[in-house]
Amino acid sequence: WAVHDRWMLLTRAEGDRAQGGEIRAFTGLGRVGFLDTMTITVWEPPRRAVVRHTGKVVRGSGAFEVEDLGAGRSRVVWSEWVLLPLGLVGQLAWPVARIPLRLLLQASLRRLARYVVAQP
């Protein structure tokens, strides 16, 4: 989590690295944003991590899974199953909000790929 901000745009994270551990991730600019708290429900390094989002804004679960493709290559699959915040308002806003969110996540994943490739 210490290097999360090197690839995930607008987010700083800190926390444990063990099953049952807690993570706190703040997403936003300056003090404007939201806190995403999580509990690690599965921790199987270097293959898999699953979290339960427990915050007020983001609720649900997420997972990172790494597939070994051989020859020094791998594939990272990042999945999120979240409940939209704000009830009906969140559901009505989702068709519009998903576009910038998708762009933000795609840019972050490109940054993650560059970060991983640059590691010795």
Image (spheres, rainbow, N blue to C red):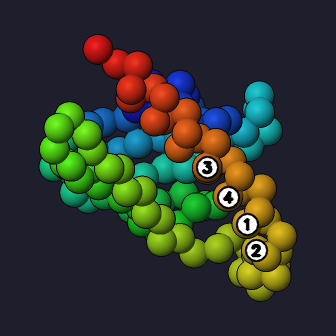
Left or right: residue 1 versus residue 45 is right
Q: Nearest to the eye among marks 4 and 2: give it.
A: 4
**Which amino acid does the dot numbered 2 rest on?**
Trp
Q: Nearest to the eye among marks 2 and 3: give it.
A: 3
Left or right: residue 85 versus residue 2 is right
Residue nearest the observer in this picture, 33 or 5: 5
Q: Position of residue 85 (x, y in %)?
A: 68, 70
Q: Tell me the distance, in whole angstroms, between the alpha carbons under discs 3 and 1.
A: 12 Å
Instruction: Compare marks 4 and 2 and give the one earlier in the sequence.
Output: 2
Mark 1 neighbour density, 10 Å: few (under 14) some (14–19) many (20 or more): few
Mark 3 neighbour density, 10 Å: few (under 14) some (14–19) many (20 or more): few
Numbered label attached to residue 94? 2
**Are dots 1 and 4 in contact, CB under 8 Å?**
yes
Numbered label attached to residue 98? 1
The outermost residue toward the top is: 120
**Which amino acid does the dot numbered 1 rest on?**
Arg
Instruction: Label 4, secondary structure: give it.
Output: helix
Q: Is residue 26 visible?
A: no
Mark 4 neighbour density, 10 Å: few (under 14) some (14–19) many (20 or more): few
Q: Is residue 78 visible?
A: yes
Left or right: residue 58 versus residue 60 is right
Q: Which residue is mark 3?
A: 106
**Are dots 1 and 2 in contact, CB under 8 Å?**
yes
Q: Which residue is mark 4?
A: 102
**Which amino acid does the dot numbered 4 rest on?**
Arg
Instruction: Label 3, secondary structure: give it.
Output: helix
**Are dots 3 and 4 in contact, CB under 8 Å?**
yes
**Which amino acid does the dot numbered 3 rest on?**
Gln
